[in-house]
Image (cartoon, rainbow, N blue to C red):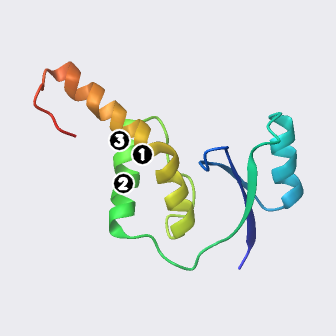
Amino acid sequence: MEKLYRVLDTEGHFLAKFSTFNDALNFKMLANRPDWKISKARTSLRKPTEKMLRAVVYIESLTPYQFTGNNEDFQEVADFIGQYLYYAKSQEEIYYDNMGYDDYKG
């Protein structure tokens, strides 16, 4: 298994991943955010669920973001969903508001 280092913001949200600790540290320092955390992660042998893969399609259909990672890696799919799902849901609400659906309960 390959070791990875993930940079998390002060609230624990995923920001980026790096193959070396020094790369992750440089990212923090270039962003001038020493308060961000670096956590060790390993690539997972676990495969993403069908629901997760459908969430990726949902996000891609409502946002300009495209998943470019390995769609057979649970962690990469989970990171993408964690980063963009909230934005996709907000885009869906805007779409239904513009269409005049007052009863929409997303």
Residue at (43, 36) in percent of width and height: 87
Q: Give the number of the disc on residue 61.
A: 3
- What residue sits right under mark 2 in the picture? 55
Where does residue 65 sit, x and y in percent of width and height?
49, 40
Q: Are marks 2 and 1 in contact (CB under 8 Å)?
A: yes
Amino acid found under the numbered disc labelled 3: Ser
38 lies left or right of 21? left
Quarter containing the N terminus: bottom right
- What residue sits right under mark 1 in the picture? 85
Of residues 34 and 54, the one nearer the viewer is 34
Amino acid found under the numbered disc labelled 2: Ala
Secondary structure category for the residue under label 3 = helix
102 lies left or right of 63? left
Distance (Cα) linking label 3 and label 1: 11 Å
Residue at (42, 45) in percent of width and height: 85
- Residue 5 to residue 9: above or below: below
